[in-house]
Amino acid sequence: MGTWYGGGYWRDRQTLLLNQWQPSKGSVPFKTAQLQPKFGGEDLGVLYPKWERDGWQRRGDNYGTDRRIENVAKYMVACDGDDGWQNKPSRKHPALIVRYIGYLARGYTFRFALDGFDDLLDEAVDSACWDSLGNLAYSRQGVLYKYSLADLKKGQPGTVRDLESLAPNRG
């Protein structure tokens, strides 16, 4: 099957949902079950149910319209009009929003926004989430940023870590 239908996610502490494949040999010390392909069999079929598990909610029923990008060497599709997902851990937190914008030069591509903080999460943001302590954590071009709710009010991150200079351990 190659790399199609790979991966999965943990439904709970004991159950790994597999994306349309089964281990062929041996056993594992936990339960496995098949992920139902609600969103297709590739990455979005794992990512969207994982977001639902983590408390993300759809902002509407429109998943957007795919539009093939012509005259490029690599296969690319733009997605126009996705209503997106949002995560809001408490009433005090602004909504963290993510929209699928297409299968572009680096694969599945998303844009993040933070309700009320329009300039904070720009198109260079790779990933964003609320951590287990209610802090906003996001990455942009190899740099990690963390904002508490108080940091957001001040307009300055509480933590910034540049990981670009790190090299893999070859030992």
Image: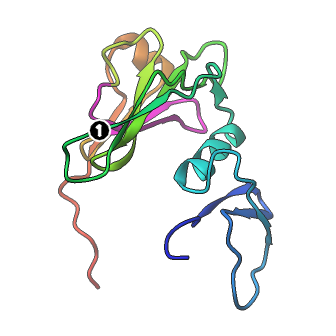
Up the image or down, 140 lies above or below 21; here it is above
Residue 29 sits inside the magenta stretch:
no
In the picture, which quadrant includes the N terminus?
Answer: bottom right
Q: Which residues are magenta?
A: 122-139
Three-letter amino acid code at disc 1? Answer: Ile
Up the image or down, 126 lies above or below 150; here it is below
Viewer-proximal residue among 93 and 68:
68
Viewer-proximal residue among 70 and 115:
70
Residue linked to disc 1: 69
Circle 1 crowding by C-alpha within 10 Å: few under 14, some 14–19, many from 20: some
Q: Quadrant of residue 126?
A: top left
Q: Secondary structure at mark 1?
A: loop
Residue drawn where x is 48% and y is 28% of the image? 65
Residue drawn where x is 70% and y is 52% of the image? 37
Q: Residue furthest front?
A: 70
Residue drawn where x is 69% and y is 38% of the image? 52
Measured as percent of width and height from the top left, residue 25 is found at 70, 91
Measured as percent of width and height from the top left, residue 76 is found at 32, 45
In the picture, which quadrant includes the C terminus?
Answer: bottom left
